[in-house]
Image (cartoon, rainbow, N blue to C red):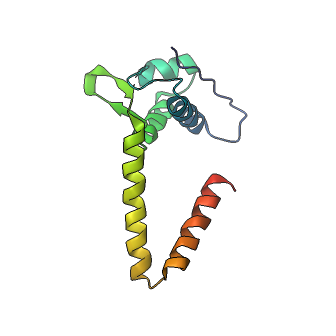
Amino acid sequence: MALHLTVDPDAAEPPYEQIRATIAEQARSGALPVGYKLPTVRGFAEELGLAANTVAKAYKALEADGVIETRGRNGTFVAAQGDTAAREAAAAASVYALRARRLGLDRDAALAAAAAAVRAAYGD
């Protein structure tokens, strides 16, 4: 099992986003299994011909999303993402619901606003 990734310098998305999206997709699809050890930031940057900060930015975003986890000097690994993603989504939804209620939105208006935001985020 290996990480397969190429960065297109002419793509509309910046390199860090290409790295983030590819690793996230491969982790979700199982191509990168839970516990898979990712290359070091510096080593991966050299392999891709990018600055270390570019790879570090992608790893930071992936860690914030719960896709990967850093275990100190042991390295960076694909996390057991399903539970983390579900918990974070539920927490975000709860914060949104409480805020919408405090703003005086009724249930239908709050749901419509959330649905519109999801459509916009997913490009629907």
Q: Which residue of the protein is positioned furthest toward the bottom in this rendering?
A: 104
Q: Nearer the viewer, residue 17 or 51?
A: 17
Q: Position of residue 80 (x, y in %)?
A: 38, 33
Q: Where 122 sits versus 33, above or below?
A: below
Residue drawn at 38 percent across, 66 percent down: 95
The C terminus - image quarter: bottom right
Q: Position of residue 106 (x, y in %)?
A: 49, 83
Q: Position of residue 87 (x, y in %)?
A: 36, 50
Residue drawn at 58 percent across, 20 percent down: 4
The answer, for residue 82, to whether it is visible in the render is: yes
Q: Nearer the viewer, residue 7 or 34?
A: 34
Q: Quadrant of residue 84?
A: top left
Left or right of 27 on screen, residue 13: right
Q: Which residue of the protein is positioned furthest toward the top in this rendering?
A: 1
Residue drawn at 58 percent across, 21 percent down: 49
Left or right of 12 on screen, residue 59: left
Q: Position of residue 27 (x, y in %)?
A: 50, 30
Q: Where 47 sits versus 50, above or below?
A: above
Residue drawn at 45 percent across, 38 percent down: 62
Q: Nearer the viewer, residue 115 or 120?
A: 115
